């Protein structure tokens, strides 16, 4: 793309963005939201509160869920599974399905059959 083409494309984008901005400035919903935010922040400053204080007053449980999720691990620990091959008596203990011998058994005997060997 040539520089002049890029320049003209950017000019067109800026003109479009300015039209959207003017439309938003005239929107009554935006004016009401801005007025509400201004009044709320003034009220918070008058009483020395922050948004977190207000949330804690209105919904005390809101902060606890986030802290509990952050404090425990990202995933729960996997359960140890024990498979015993009835043909050979060989035992495989694994926490995941990515075990070399378990994969070989599943190839040879089928996944459903090997899962029936789970103890």
Image (cartoon, rainbow, N blue to C red):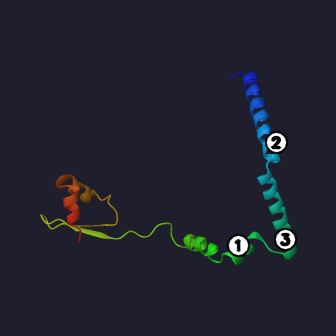
Can you give x and y, in whole percent of width and height, for residue 114 in the image?
21, 61
Can you give x and y, in whole percent of width and height, for residue 65 in the image?
58, 73
Quadrant hosting residue 69: bottom right
Separation of marks 1 and 3 at Cα, in angstroms:
15 Å
Q: Which residue is mark 1?
A: 55
Label 1: element kind:
helix
Position above or below: 31 against 55:
above
Q: Nearer the viewer, mark 2 or mark 1?
A: 2
- Give the side of residue 41 with respect to residue 96, left or right: right
Q: Earlier in the sequence, mark 2 or mark 1?
A: 2
Can you give x and y, in whole percent of width and height, for residue 47 in the image?
85, 76
Q: Quadrant of the N terminus?
A: top right
Q: Which residue is mark 3?
A: 43
Which residue is pictured at 70% across the width and 72% down the height? 55
- Give the side of residue 111 with respect to residue 76, left or right: left
Can you give x and y, in whole percent of width and height, for residue 48 in the image?
84, 75
- Give the side of residue 48 with respect to residue 55, left or right: right
Separation of marks 2 and 3 at Cα, in angstroms:
29 Å
Which residue is pictured at 18% across the width and 66% down the height? 90
**Disc 1 packing (10 Å; few <14; some 14–19; many ≥20):** few
Q: Earlier in the sequence, mark 2 or mark 3?
A: 2
**Disc 2 packing (10 Å; few <14; some 14–19; many ≥20):** few
Q: Nearer the viewer, mark 2 or mark 3?
A: 2
Separation of marks 2 and 1 at Cα, in angstroms:
33 Å
Q: Which label is found at residue 22?
A: 2
Q: Quadrant of the C terminus?
A: bottom left
């Amino acid at each position: 793309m040539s520089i002049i083409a890029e320049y003209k494309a950017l000019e067109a984008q800026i003109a479009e963005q300015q039209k959207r901005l003017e439309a938003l400035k005239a929107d009554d919903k935006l004016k009401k939201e801005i007025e509400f935010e201004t009044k709320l922040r003034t009220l918070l400053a008058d009483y020395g509160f922050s948004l977190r204080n207000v949330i804690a007053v209105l919904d005390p449980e809101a902060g606890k869920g986030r802290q509990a999720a952050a404090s425990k691990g990202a995933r729960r620990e996997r359960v140890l599974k024990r498979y015993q091959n009835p043909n050979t008596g060989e035992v495989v203990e694994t926490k995941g399905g990515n075990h070399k011998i378990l994969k070989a058994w599943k190839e040879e005997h089928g996944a459903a059959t090997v899962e029936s060997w789970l103890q």
